[in-house]
Amino acid sequence: MTSDAPLKPSAPRPDAAQVKLAHGWLHTARFLTTAPQLQHLPALDMPEIAFVGRSNAGKSTCINTMTQQKRLAFASKTPGRTQSINLFALGKQGAVDAVLADLPGYGYAAVPREAKLRWQRVMGNYLLTRPNLRGVVLLCDPRHGLTELDDILLEVIRPRVEQGMKFLLLLTKADKLTRAEANKALSIARLQAAGGEVKLFSALKKQGLDDVALWLWELTREHQPVPPMAELVPPTEGAGPDAVN
């Protein structure tokens, strides 16, 4: 990141022991299951955190970087090809105390319309009705900002966020921004995050790893369930996140 303006003062640095504990916990991640439909997801009572975002926003890279595993989350060479919800278990000594959910990237124009509409329903219903869902991480390339598809997703999860579900807007590929651009991206994103937190992240420069690790760790240590909402009505023609393209 080049320097042409000072970054705004950051929050106090977290305790080093907590950071080490959070990273060690994330490094226990392992594949749990994959589900092409909601009914194939196992019923779980431990906290679950969903990673969502447009294709090429850096979602798989983020998960692999945070867990220090090269291919835990599969990054397809063809964006939009991953069409399942993948769950990864977290917990030391074989125990499972939390789960990460990797949802398919959305917005890739080459995906057939029928597949887009199907995944619109699956993702929407998952985000609204998954009982153990405690938080959502929305990944966004700050060079492009939040798109119409991202705004629609924010509206989908807004009812649960208003009831207390945690939300993190993660600005990926921050190494491609100057300091001035990073400050501007943070300011804009904070206005759009609807009460959620906003953080910069760079897998290449290892920027933001401590902040994200602690956010995930602390979230899964809270035990306040967020009530699921009513299941979505099947979308009409042209409605929903993936129907925009």
Image (cartoon, helix red, strand yellow):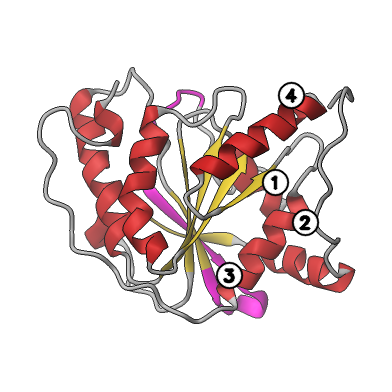
| Sequence-wise first label, 4 or 3 | 4
Q: Amino acid at mark 1?
A: Thr
Q: Secondary structure at mark 4?
A: helix
Return the x and y of residue 199 as percentages of the image width and height: 67, 47
Q: Horizontal and vertical percent for residue 142?
A: 61, 29
Q: Quadrant of the C terminus?
A: top left
User: Which corner quadrant of the image does residue 34 belong to?
Assistant: bottom left
Give the residue pinned by disc 3: 219
Label drawn at residue 176: 4
First-in-chain label (1 vs 2)? 1
Q: Tell me if 211 is positioned left or right of 239 in this view.
A: right
- For the residues labelled 4 and 3, the Cα–Cα distance comes to 29 Å
Q: Residue at x 76, y 67 (%)?
A: 24
Q: Amino acid at mark 2?
A: Asp
In the rendered image, the vertical position of residue 235 relative to residue 238, given as above or below: below
The label shown at residue 65 is: 1
Residue 85 shown left or right of residue 95 in the figure: left
Distance from label 1 to label 4 (Cα)?
A: 17 Å
Which class describes the residues within 10 Å of circle 3: few (<14), some (14-19), or many (20+)?
A: some
Q: Is residue 36 visible?
A: no
Which amino acid type corresponds to the residue marked 4 in the rendered image? Lys
Viewer-nearest of discs 1 and 2:
2
Other residues around mark 4 within 10 Å, as few (<14) / some (14–19) / many (≥20) = some
Q: Check disc 1 and report its element: helix, strand or loop.
A: helix
Indicate the position of residue 64 as horizontal and vertical percent values.
64, 46
Q: What residue is shown with label 2?
A: 210
